[in-house]
Image (cartoon, rainbow, N blue to C red):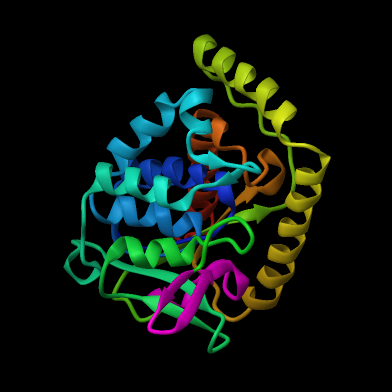
């Protein structure tokens, strides 16, 4: 079965997209097109150029010092360093030459509209799509100022609506809160707990307010846009599993994505959406 995959933004929760993609492939789905916003565009791009396994191995291996290298005072992510590393892992690509149709959605502040990157340099489009205002530098192209696609379209279903796929599956990183207990190997859990303790000392209550503000803004936008285009299957990732900056939780978030994909596919099978 051929799938068009839509990956929403959501910061670090976007690591759940990795587990989603791996589970869909193990189920036998062929991903023929991907549309993504922000972190969804990052993971979607890595998958589209065939480097997801390499990217996953890298994020799974990161320790505190490795992650901290991608931050700059006052604890903001350094977009240039991040994308230089991603390009090192995945290589340079033109979007139109990828084996999978790909769309990165960004927001044009100059023209006050969303922009679809479907050709040209892959990482320029992805960088624009994930340029969270206030945390990453905007991308400037031909006098236009481009920022995170989530400002206008958090889960971009529209770019895949005309694809000749059998089914559209969307991953929503702003699902309702719930408790999910994922078992991880002892050493991985121990490492994550150590990183968690350090992380809490670095990110102050001010950062928690920023996180809450971003979540509220994104939720409002998502509710507004969601009714426009409805996917065949929506995989809902609870927003309480991680804050946008919890990039040290990659192992757990990947497994949560895998677990919730299994649940969503099981329900879709019961409803006759898939065989």
Which residue is nearer to you in this view: 252 or 108? 108
Q: Residue at x 64, y 18 (%)?
A: 193
Q: Quadrant of the C terminus?
A: bottom left
Q: Residue at x 67, y 33 (%)?
A: 180
Residue at the far top: name it: 186
Can residue 3 be seen at all in this image of the molecule? no
**Residue 246 placement (x, y as % from top left):** 61, 37
Which residue is nearer to you in this view: 95 or 240? 95
Q: Residue at x 21, y 66 (%)?
A: 94
**Residue 11 placement (x, y as % from top left):** 57, 50
**Residue 108 placement (x, y as % from top left):** 51, 80
Q: Along the horizontal axis of the image, is 14 left or right of 88?
A: right
* Above/below status of 202 relative to 221: above
Which residue is nearer to you in this view: 125 or 44? 125
* Above/below status of 260 relative to 255: below
Q: Quadrant of the N terminus?
A: bottom left
Can residue 104 be seen at all in this image of the molecule? yes
* Above/below status of 21 relative to 170: above
Read off the magenta span.
139-160
């Amino acid at each position: 079965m051929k799938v068009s995959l839509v990956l929403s933004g959501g910061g670090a929760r976007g690591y759940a997209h990795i587990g989603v993609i791996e589970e869909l492939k193990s189920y036998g789905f062929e991903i023929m097109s991907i549309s993504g916003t922000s972190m969804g565009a990052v993971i979607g791009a890595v998958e589209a150029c065939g480097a997801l396994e390499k990217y996953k191995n890298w994020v799974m291996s990161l320790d505190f010092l490795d992650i901290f290298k991608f931050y700059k005072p006052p604890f903001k992510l350094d977009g240039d360093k991040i994308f230089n590393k991603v390009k090192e892992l995945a290589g340079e690509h033109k979007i139109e030459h990828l084996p999978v149709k790909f769309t990165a959605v960004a927001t044009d502040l100059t023209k006050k509209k969303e922009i679809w990157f479907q050709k040209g340099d892959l990482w320029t489009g992805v960088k624009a799509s994930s340029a969270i205002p206030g945390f990453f530098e905007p991308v400037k192209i031909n006098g236009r100022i481009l920022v995170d696609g989530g400002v206008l379209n958090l889960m971009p279903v529209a770019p895949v609506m005309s694809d000749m796929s059998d089914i559209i599956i969307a991953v929503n990183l702003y699902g309702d809160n719930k408790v999910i207990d994922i078992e991880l190997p002892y050493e991985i859990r121990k490492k994550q707990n150590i990183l968690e303790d350090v992380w809490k000392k670095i990110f102050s209550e001010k950062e928690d307010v920023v996180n809450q503000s971003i979540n509220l803004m994104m939720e409002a936008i998502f509710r507004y846009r969601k009714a426009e285009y409805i996917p065949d299957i929506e995989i809902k990732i609870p927003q309480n599993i991680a804050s946008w900056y919890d990039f040290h939780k990659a192992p757990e978030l990947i497994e949560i994505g895998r677990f919730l994909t299994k649940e969503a596919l099981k329900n879709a099978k019961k409803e006759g959406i898939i065989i």
